[in-house]
Amino acid sequence: MTLDTDTMTVSSKGTLPSVPFLALKEKILGKKYELSIRFVAPAEAQALNIAHRNKDYIPNTLSFPLSETSGEIILCRSAMRREYKDFDMEYEQYLVFIIIHSMLHLKGYEHGSTMERKERDILALFT
């Protein structure tokens, strides 16, 4: 299934989850930012993680800035389904959190207290 707008594409082999993808993108990255989000199988997520980060595990997300105004996010549902309870969230809320996290990486944020504060603030707007 695919959601396609002028500045955003979300694709998955299965049903897309009920997430405000476009509203999140516009809030975090802006209306003109071009974003592709792909839900992939664990093997593809792991292969991308090895190829681009030299890390051999199945990631929940990978963020790839392509330019200052475009990027791609790779999401692995099975990894997120294994993890969401560790974060004391429901699956849908965790999915929104991971998308926020990924978009903040595309904006240039690195892990730390500033990023965590931004994640909490934005998550509160969307859950």
Image (cartoon, rainbow, N blue to C red):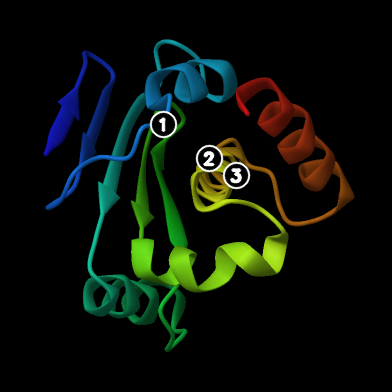
Q: CA distance from mark 3 to mark 1?
A: 11 Å
Q: Which residue is located at x 73 percent, y 28 percent?
A: 124
Picture coordinates of residue 42 (x, y %)?
29, 75
Q: Which residue is mark 2?
A: 96
Question: Of the residues shown, which amino acid type is indicated by label 2?
Answer: Val
Residue picked out by circle 1: 19
Q: Position of residue 101 (x, y in %)?
A: 60, 46
Residue contact at pointers 1 and 2, CB within 8 angstroms: yes
Image quarter of residue 18: top left
Residue hosting label 3:
97
Residue reaching furthest bottom? 56
The local crowd at label 1, few if under 14, some if 14 to 19, many if 20 or more residues have their Cα within 10 Å, is some
Compared across the picture, whether 112 is left or right of 22 comes to right
Pinpoint residue 14: horizontal percent, then vertical percent.
15, 51
- Report x, y in % for residue 113: 88, 50
Name the amino acid type tagged 1: Val
Q: Under tag 3, what secondary structure? A: helix
Q: Is residue 39 left or right of residue 110?
A: left
| CA distance for labels 1 and 2 | 7 Å
Q: SS class of the residue under badge 2? A: helix
Up-down relation of residue 91 to residue 93 (above or below): below
Badge 3 amino acid? Phe
Say few, some or many: other residues with alpha carbon within 10 Å of mark 3 (under 14 / 14 to 19 / 20 or more).
many
Q: Residue at x 58, y 24 (%)?
A: 28
Q: Is residue 73 left or right of residue 29?
A: left
Between 104 and 87, which is closer to the camera in this rendering? 87
Q: Is there a contact, CB below 8 Å, between mark 3 and mark 2?
A: yes
Q: Earlier in the sequence, mark 1 or mark 2?
A: 1
Quadrant the C terminus occupies: top right
State the image quarter where residue 5 is shown.
top left
